[in-house]
Image: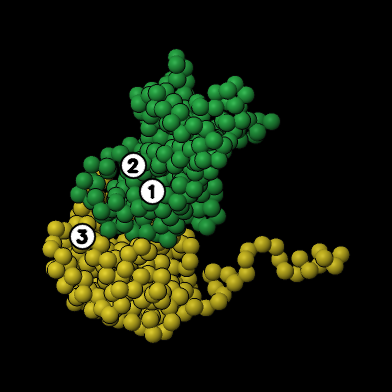
Chain colours: A green, B yellow
Amino acid sequence: MLDRIAALGRKGLSVFERLGRGHLFLLQMLAGIPSLVSRIPLVVQQIYAVGVLSFLIILVSGFFVGMVLGLQGYNVLIDFGAEESLGQMVALSLVRELGPVVTALLFAGRAGSALTAEIGLMKATEQLSGMEMMAVDPLKRVMAPRFLAGVISMPLLAAIFSAVGVIGGFFVGVGLLGVDDGAFWSQMQAKVDLQEDIFNGVIKSFVFGIACTWIAVFEGYDAVPTSEGVSRATTRTVVHSALAVLGLDFILTALMFSDV
Amino acid sequence: MSDSQVITKIRDLHFTRGNRKIFDGIDIDIHRGKITAIMGPSGTGKTTLLKLIGGQLYPEQGSVEVDGENVHKLKRRELFELRKRMGMLFQSGALLTDLTVFDNVAFPLREHTNLPETMVRDMVLMKLEAVGLRNARDLVPGELSGGMARRVALARAIALDPMMIMYDEPFTGQDPISMGALVQLIKLINDALGISSIVVSHDVAETATIADYIYVISEGRVIGQGTPEELNMTDSEWVKQFMQGLPDGPVPFHFPGTDYADDLLQGAG
């Protein structure tokens, strides 16, 4: 019995120790960001790897999610004769919730897992140790550019997701189901607020970008340097990112929209 | 020998990993301009020793001084300054896989100097020429053999003209030609550039041909030291077994446990 309590205690301590390491890691990485001013090409290269290469999956997913929203929204709104509000419904669902959340989940699966695997393998093949012995700080040279690239890419990808989603909703609602073209756009324009909706959505995606990239980069850096260790770290990245995004989404939604 | 001729001084070093004592008070001196070999069976902590010298690990007790500076008392920035004067060749080569051979060798130059690109190019080509891989500069690490990767790593290690290079098992898993090339290169680079070399290895024959001084470590202690000739004529049974590669001796062939006859009789009865 005592053994079990001790094991539980050890497990708890190791979780907190890891949390502490993760936060120290974030601080050290943030301290490395000013030095990136002279290394813009490194950041651009990483924006390509994590952002541009995620573009297609975001584009396709956004379009499908928009189409489904158009279809489901039409079926509900038609009962109340309010199908002309479809544009408003699709746009608000996307910019407030689905854009940031689904993009973050896809981002964690596509770019986050790749970041963890890349950094974990660099650790396993002694590339990070090698850099340290060459007096090059991997936190500044490897982690900081990837982190910054993720934080920059995420809001842009979420914006693209929402924009393409609106087009998907338009395609189904106006193109296939016959909602009035003018009503679709004018309702959207009238009811979607720049500050309340779009700006809050951007903040959400920015926060998700920090969370997902931080988790991905830290998991890679903290991975056990074996093939099994890297595989576990990659799985943890996707699971922890998804949980963090959904948890943070609830907190942010409560803070932003509870009084609307 | 006077202190000024000692580039690395290790005193009373203790290091434990988990429940296992890796070093139990070892003293080692590495002399300037010489090739010093650290030898011992696999798992005796030879690579750990290099990481302790490079400041990547911290000992529980004892000190490591490199060029008069206590490695483990330096601030991070000072440690990085010291590391610019140290080169390390990892067993795997540790080349950056997303860069070409050229960019790998140029990496420390671009990170630590503001030299114009034309000068970086000249310097990289000189280093690559020294290891015989100037014409392989556009390959990526995945296209190199193990021996070539280590030679590229060697070119990278000497890019900043260090005062000391540490070699971690440079000969392991090499074919005879690559091995010969590496043995020759280590000796040549040490003598031509006037640097100090620490070679960690368990390849007795190759290491003994180039080493000026050898330390043999086992079970956390230095159990033999001297020039290759002195070690070959040692009285220590242990050192003799290691240097001559005898299968049985103080290090038993059989994994310790129950008696063979008892074991067989137990099954019969």
Q: Nearer the viewer, residue B258 or B187?
A: B187
| Type of amino acid under label 1 | Gly
What SS does tag 2 mark? helix
Q: Chain of mark 3?
A: B
Q: Are marks 3 and 1 on the same chain?
A: no
What SS does tag 3 mark? helix
State the residue at coordinates (57%, 37%).
A177
CB atoms of marks 3 and 1 within 8 Å: no
Q: Which mark is residue B110?
A: 3
Q: CA distance from mark 3 to mark 2?
A: 26 Å
Closer to the eye: label 3 or 1: 1
Q: Which residue is mark 1?
A: A51
Q: Quadrant of residue B162?
A: bottom left
- Against A25, residue B180 (above or below) is below
- Against A191, residue B26 (above or below) is below
- Against A150, residue B156 (above or below) is below
Q: Nearer the viewer, residue B179 or A97?
A: A97
Q: Which residue is mark 2?
A: A152
- The answer to whether residue A1 is seen in the rendering is yes
What SS does tag 1 mark? helix
| Type of amino acid under label 2 | Ile
Q: Quadrant of residue B66?
A: bottom left
Quadrant of the image for the C terminus of chain B? bottom right
